[in-house]
Image (spheres, grey):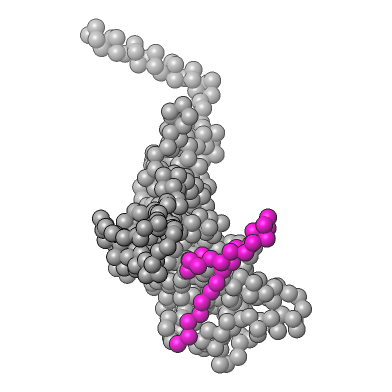
Amino acid sequence: MTERRIQAFVFDSGSGAVARINSPLLAAAAYDLAAHHEVVKAVTDPLPRGSRRLRQKYGVQVGGVSCASRPFDMALFAYAMTLNTYHARAVRAKVKDITGRPWVIAGEGSPAAKTIIERFFREAFDRRSFAQGMGCIWTDYEGLGNGYMEVVTDPRGEPVALEHLPATEMWVRLDGLGYIQQRGGEVAHFRVWGLDDEAYSGLPAEDPLAPGKPATHVIHFLRYSPWSQFYGLPAILPAWAAVCLSVLVNEYNLTFFQNNAIPDYAVILEGEVEEQAADVIRTYFRHHLKGQAHKTLVLESPSGSKIRFEKLTDSSAREGSFRLLRTDCRDEILHAHGVPPQKVGIVETGKLGGNLSSEQIREYQLSIVVPSQEEIASRMTDLIRRGFGLDGLRFEFLPADTEDRKLNAEIDQIYLQNRVLVPNEVRAKRFPDAAPLPGGDDPVGAPSMAELAGLDQAMGDLQRQIREAVKG
């Protein structure tokens, strides 16, 4: 088996110098992006001949089917989630806040239909709960920019189960009609969920997705980027250099402490020194000092010669600069994810000593959590509509914290006061399992002047009756 070694280079436009990058993580970051650019150009090129030629040149054959080349190394980015603490915690925090929230089946429909749909989602991932199963898919989405959900249906086309397909194993067909999972030497073919059967009628008989051949469906969650129309790009991609730098800092410190925290030295031999002296010093540092602290080297120099050890690096200055570098890398990684520091265990204070967490978390909820939940809810609602034929029901996530509940209550109160909604409509939306209130279909609003006058008269009569009863 031949080993493919990727070498990356950094070009300094100021000095014109080119430096080689030896770190495997940085080298793999220079994946063949140019080839993928040609694939995107091939598919979007209106000229048929050029498009076909570029597809044949750059398309990846998986299971005998042409698939789009990936814009980056999926396995490398999956491995990167194990290399940086803040990257890993940011992914886990978003997955928990997005998919771990309570959910309900709301909308217009019979209680029996709601019960069936709710039971399906609770049992869809077999031994995993919906939050756990969807959490696996969303971990791929946040870490790799792509999440794949398999929809298993019965002969009638009704969904019976959901499965998580690892994003590292998935490929997208160039014709946009399906997906291929490759694991080892085996492949599995899937159709696109929601695509009409007529779209597959023109496929040749030998195609795995041709009409009459069994195939389940896949829902593809992808983080859109103009760079690729087939695959999504991960949120960490703009901060990829920060992840690489943090890895290099850790590797440097690890090497430093493997050398017993001894900084770099230059050994200078002056005067007439025996030829074997240099070899003895070199052997000592390579084989006797590394990994073994508190070793002593005894050297005898002839008259008129001198052996000097000079420190080349200032450990204190280097440590200070590395601390700033680690902080900058951490902040850039969190900014790329849109996660406030509090979510990964970092507490920040404002310039006047106030806590910034409430504002940052609020922005995080509105810009990261809510849009992602809306994306999942939209896909699950489409699954209910297409799979079960129920247009009136929808999948909804419930707000998790008191601030969201308070805001919803204030909004509902405004709707009620302005007669936009009636109490039973609010009750069905916020508490789907609760029974309607008697008289809850009548609008509630500010009372008129006549109603206030009648209420005043009734209160006066009630007070008079109370006084007479007390006297009696």
Indicate the quadrant where residue 110 lies. bottom left
Is residue 308 visible in the rendered image? The answer is yes
Return the residue nearer the eye: 134 or 198: 134
Residue sitting at the far top: 471
Query: What residue is drawn where x is 69% and y is 81%?
Result: 54
Q: Nearer the viewer, residue 141 or 103?
A: 141
Q: Residue 283: image x %, image y %? A: 34, 68
Question: Residue at 43% across / 15% down in the picture?
Answer: 457
Residue 247 percent across, percent down from the top left: 44, 59
Is residue 235 shown above or below 213? above
Q: Quadrant of the N terminus?
A: bottom left
Q: Residue at x 31, y 68 (%)?
A: 287
- x%, y% of residue 17? 64, 61
Residue 14 highlighted magenta (yes or no) = yes
Whether 406 is drawn above or below 7: the answer is above
Residue at the image position 44 percent from the left and 20 percent from the top: 455
- 246 and 268: which one is in front? 268
Counting from the top left corner in percent of width and height, residue 309 is at 40, 54
| Residue 311 located left or right of residue 194 | left
> Against 92, is 386 above or below?
below
- Give the magenta-colored segment's residue range: 1-26
Quadrant in which the C terminus appears: top left
Pick out the residue farthest to the front: 303
Please, which residue is most extreme toward the bottom here? Answer: 206
Magenta segment: does it hold 195?
no
Q: Is residue 76 above or below residue 306?
A: below
